[in-house]
Image (cartoon, helix red, strand yellow):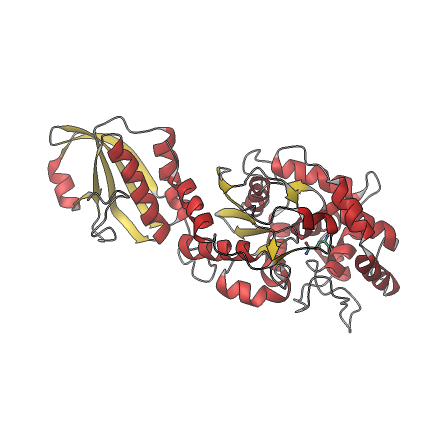
Amino acid sequence: MRSPIRDYLDAVIRDTSDITSGKVSDDIPELARVDPDLVAVSLSTVTGTVYSSGDHEHQFSIQSMSKPFAYAMAIEDHGLDEVLNHVGVEPSGDPFNEFSLDERTAKPRNPMINAGAIATHGLIKSDHAPASDRLMDLYSQLTQRNVEIDESVVASEMAAGDRNLGLAYLLSAAGALHLNPPAAVAGYVRQCAAMMTVDDLALMAATLANGGVQPNTGNRIFSRATTKQVLSVMASCGMYDAAGDWMTSVGIPAKSGVAGGIIGVLPGQIGVAVFSPRLDHHGNSERGSEMMRLLSENLGLHLMTAGRPARSSLREVHTAQVDDEAATIYALQGDLSLSSIETLVHEITTNPPQDPLVVFDMTRIDEVLQVAHETASSLATTLIDQGHRVIFVDPTEAFADFRDEEGREVERWSPEELREHTSGS
Ligand code: GLN
C-alpha cells in the first residue's frame, strides 16, 4: 500500500516547483555542472523509517553539512572544554567564507563557518588515520553504506581554493590551527566532498534527532551531551548570516551545503534532508529553504511551538463486531503530528486491516495538525478504494466536514455511538 507520507512529500516538491530563482554555486567549478532542476526530499523517523520523494537516489557532495559531524567527532576526541578553547559558539553574522576571527579571543567564532570548520578539522585526532578517512568511516556508520569521496569535486575545490587556504594561514598565524595550513585545507576539502543522497542525510540527521544513536543499528555514535552541543550550534549558526531568519521561519537546527543540500533536525522526532542546487545569496538552497519552511509549517516542526512531547498516536488495535459487521478499530491518542501519526500509517501499510469495517477512534486525541488531516484523508481514500467502510469517531470535531481525496464523505460517529453499536473485542 502506498504511504500517505510519501504522497505528502510529493506535494512538497510539486508545491515548490515554481521556485527557480537562485544560482548554482560556481565557487567550486565542478558543482556548476549539476542539473539545476534536480530536487529531492527525505525524512527519517527516530525509529529509522525513511520516506522520500523526487531525485532521492541522486548523489551530491555533503559540503558544509559535514561540519556538524566533524565538530561532533572533535568533541568526542577531546571533550567539549578543549574544543571550546579553540573554536567559539557565537553566530558570526558573516558569510560562510568570511575572513573572520573573534577580535578579542583570536578564535574562529563558530564551527559552522569555514574558519571554524577548518580549525575543527585540524582538531580531529589523526595519529592512526587521516581525519578525512575517519570522517568517511563515520559517515558510513551513520548511513549504513560505504560512503565515498568524489575526487573530481576535491580536485576542483583544491584548484579554486585560495580563499580557504588564506583562512587557514590566518588561523595558523593566530595560533588557532593544529595542522599546517595546506594539510588542513586538503583534509577539510575531502571532508566536504563525500557523496550523499538525501536519504543518507536524513538518516544522519535522524541520528542527531535520536540523541546520537543510529536509529537502525542502535549503535551510539555520539554521546547525548555531544549531540546536544552540535544541535545547539546548528540552531544558532547553521544557516550562517541567515540564521536568525531561519530560526524564526523554520525553527529547527539545520545546516546547509553549497551543493544545494540542507539537513534539519527535530530533536526526539525526525531528521529531514532536502536538495535543490540553486542557492540564495547566503549560499543556502533557495527551493530547499522553502521546502523546509513548508515541512516545518505543515508538520508542526518549529521548536518554539512544539508544546507537548510527542508520543505514539496508536494506542491499540483491536477487532470487534460493530452491529453485525466485523471491524478493526484503531484507537488513537495525543496530538496527531507527523511523528505520532507515522506509527498508524506504518501499521496500516505493513499490516492492512482484513475486516470490512475500519474505525479510527479519536476519542483521546487532543490536537490535529494539518499534515495529519492530509494523511488521514489519503488513508481513508485508499481504504475506501479497497472496499472498506470507514468510520471516524471524532469528538473534537477536528474532522468535521471531512472528505477523502475523492470528495467522498467519511462517516463520523460519537464515542457513545461507537460504544452502543460495539460488542466483543
Ligand atoms: N567546501 C565548501 C567551502 O569550503 C563548503 C562551503 C559550504 O558548503 N557552504 O567553500
The quarter of the displayed image where residue 176 is located: bottom right
Decide which of 43, 33 is in the foreground and name it.
33
Of all residues, the one furthest to the top in this rendering is 354
Left/right of residue 43 with respect to residue 411 in the rendered view: right
Left or right: 416 as drawn, with respect to 105: left
Q: Quadrant of ligand 1?
A: bottom right
Q: Residue 271 location, x and y as percent?
A: 53, 47
Number of callouts in the render? Answer: 0
Residue 396 horizontal side relative to residue 292, left or right: left
Residue 9's spot in the image, x, y percent? 44, 45
Rendered residue at 76%/56% (across/down)? 82
Name the residue: 39% across, 37% down: 3
Tell me residue 321's x, y (percent): 16, 29
Provide residue 1's location: percent of width, then percent of height. 37, 31
Does the rendering let one see residue 190? no
Q: Residue at x 32, y 29 (%)?
A: 352
- State whether residue 326 is above or below residue 333: above
